[in-house]
Structures are given as structure tokens and as C-alpha cells.
Image (cartoon, grey):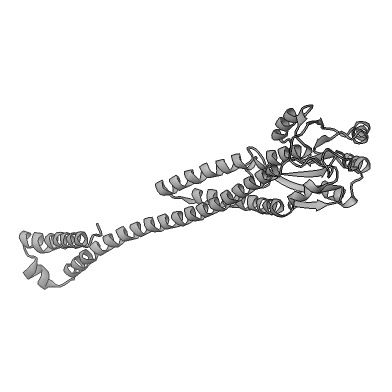
Amino acid sequence: MSGSGKAHSGSDGRNGGGEHAGMKMSCFTDVDSERLKQQLHDDEFFWLDLQDPSDQQIEQLGEIFGFHPLALEDSRSFDQRPKLDDYEDYMFLVFYGACEGQQTDEQLLREVHLFVSGGYVVTLHHGEIKEFHGVRERTTGQELRSEQFLIYLILDAVTDTFFPLLERIDEEIDAIEDAVIADPGEGQLQRIFALKRKLVALRRVVTPQRDIFARGIDRISELPGLQTDERDYFRDVYDHLIRISDLVDSYRDLLSGATDMHLSTVANRQGEVSKQLTIIATIFLPLTFITGFFGQNFAYLTSHVIDSTWSFLVFGLGSLVISCLLLLVYFKRKGWL
């Protein structure tokens, strides 16, 4: 079960999904050249997990495993698009997971590089991936059904890191919708746009990863010397990626709906304010006319019309009050109040 293509049980050199006697797997977290070469020589399957690999360690990997210079160059350059490159005896896979507790767009994703062959799995990543601790505890020194099962555990652990992040996004969308209904403001729009940027970043990696599993992940099972088990393993990861992709798309639609709801709520409130101001201006319109009319500097008005207390109360104040009452009754009948 090494990259040299040594035969396994079964007529074609692989177990075809029947009963497996089991295999023990070793895990390393540092480049120990002598130990790794011995593992390769003894044809013992192992997992090498390197956190924050240095250029010197990557050069050592090239010497130990004979990786192609292009593969080594890619392994140095993070921030790549998800991909699966076939180098005949091994494959180079760029895969993404989500960072736990990170809120900024730059720290949202965690990139993992995998070298997969029939004799080993090498993973390179920046920063700690807590989920790998559980995988190591579950596999180190334990009997595994197949080499394929370890590859599945690694990919599944990275894939499942998206779900806690998406759950937090879902809760934040609900909170934004409640806030928009209660008191829409500029802060809600900023939160909506921030979440949209996160979803765009997620969609940029989830979609190509889903396509990789849809078209080419079965090529890993065809690697020389790789002991396979069941195709359901990779299908499970593919199903998770489909679910993640659907959630990202649905959350984008929800955010678009929240944006429309925010804009419409603000517009409705502005319409209410405009209506109130219009009512006030309309009420003062006849008042302005009446006061302007009686404010004309003609002796006839003061000598013959408003020449007593009762005429002042009737024509002066009474006309103002009556005009206001008539307008209020009109607005009430129209349903504007």
C-alpha cells in the first residue's frame, strides 16, 4: 500500500469494498527525513501533517517524496483556487475550510494543501486546525478500514468547519431582520454588506470544491497502491459540499431580501414623515390666507368688519378654528389620519 504500487488483497491490487483486515496508520507532525524514508521503505502508510511549513521543510519533502517542482511551488503559494492536479503516482489537492471564530474577510478561510498517494498523505496549512487533532487521535496507531478512509476523514473534517460559520451567519441574518423591522438604520446595511462579502468569499471556494468532487475526486481511488473501501466516503463529502453551497446561495437570497426590506421600511417611514409634514403644511395654508387677508391695511376692515370684541372672536379666531376643524374632518374621511 505504498506509492510504489505494491499489491493488496484482491485480484486488481485493491480491496473492492468487501471485508478489510484493517491497517495501522502512523501520524507525524514534523519532517523527520530518516523516519519518513523508513516508512516509505517499509511500505507503511502514514500521515504527515505540517503546520506553517518553512521553505526548508518543503525542500525536504521534495527530496523525500520526489514531488514535482511545480507541485512544490504550488505548496509554497497559499491563496490558490481549489484544484486537483494529477502527477500519476500522487495527486496535489488544494482544499479550503473555515476558520473558527474569525470575523474578518481575510481570516475567514483556511487553505489546506494535500499530497495524496497510495503510501502516504501529506497536509500543509497555516495556523492550527483543531479538527485534525480529533482525526489524529482517532487514527494514530489504530486499525483503519482502508487508506481511503483516512483521506475521507481529513477532507470531511475540513469540510465540516463550514457548518458552524454558516450557523452563525444564519443567526445574524435573523437578528438583522428583526432589527430592520424594529428600527432600521445605517448599521443594519453595513452588517448586511459585511455578510454578503463573507458569503462571496465562501462561494468562491465552495463552488469549485463541489465541482472537483463531482468530476474528478474518484481519480484518487485510481492512484497506484491506494487501498480503497467504499465510494460512499467521498460521496458523503460531496453531499456536504452541495449542502454548504445551497446554504450559501440561500443566505445570499435572504440578505438580498433583508436589503429590500430595509430600503422599503425606510422609504415607508420617510413617506409617513412626508405625509405628516404635508398635513401640517395644508392646515397652515388656510390659516396663512386668513391672517393675511385680515392683516391688510384697509380702514374698512377695522372700521366696519372687525370693530368689536365679538366680531374679532367670530371672524378673527373663529375662522381659524373652523378651517382647522374642516381640514381635520376631511383628512379623517380620506383615511390620512
Where, quadrant-wise, is the C terminus in this rendering?
bottom left
Is residue 79 in sight in this rendering? Answer: no
Give coordinates of residue 303: x percent, y percent: 8, 69
Give coordinates of residue 89: x percent, y percent: 87, 47
Question: Going by the picture, which residue comes out furthest to the front?
Answer: 11
Give coordinates of residue 149: x percent, y percent: 74, 38
Is residue 320 or residue 162 the one in the foreground?
162
Is residue 319 or residue 254 the one in the foreground?
254
Residue in view at x 46 percent, y 50 percent: 185
Number of numbered labels in the structure image: 0
Q: Is residue 199 left or right of residue 77?
A: left
Residue in view at x 87 percent, y 52 percent: 70
Is residue 15 in sight in this rendering? Answer: yes
Location of residue 237 by image quarter: top right
Location of residue 17 by image quarter: top right
Residue in view at x 48 percent, y 55 percent: 257
Give coordinates of residue 199: x percent, y percent: 60, 50
Q: Is residue 153 left or right of residue 260?
A: right
Location of residue 25 by image quarter: top right
Residue in view at x 22 percent, y 61 percent: 331
Is residue 67 or residue 57 the one in the foreground?
67
Where, quadrant-wise, is the N terminus in this rendering?
top right
Q: Is residue 244 left or right of residue 110?
A: left
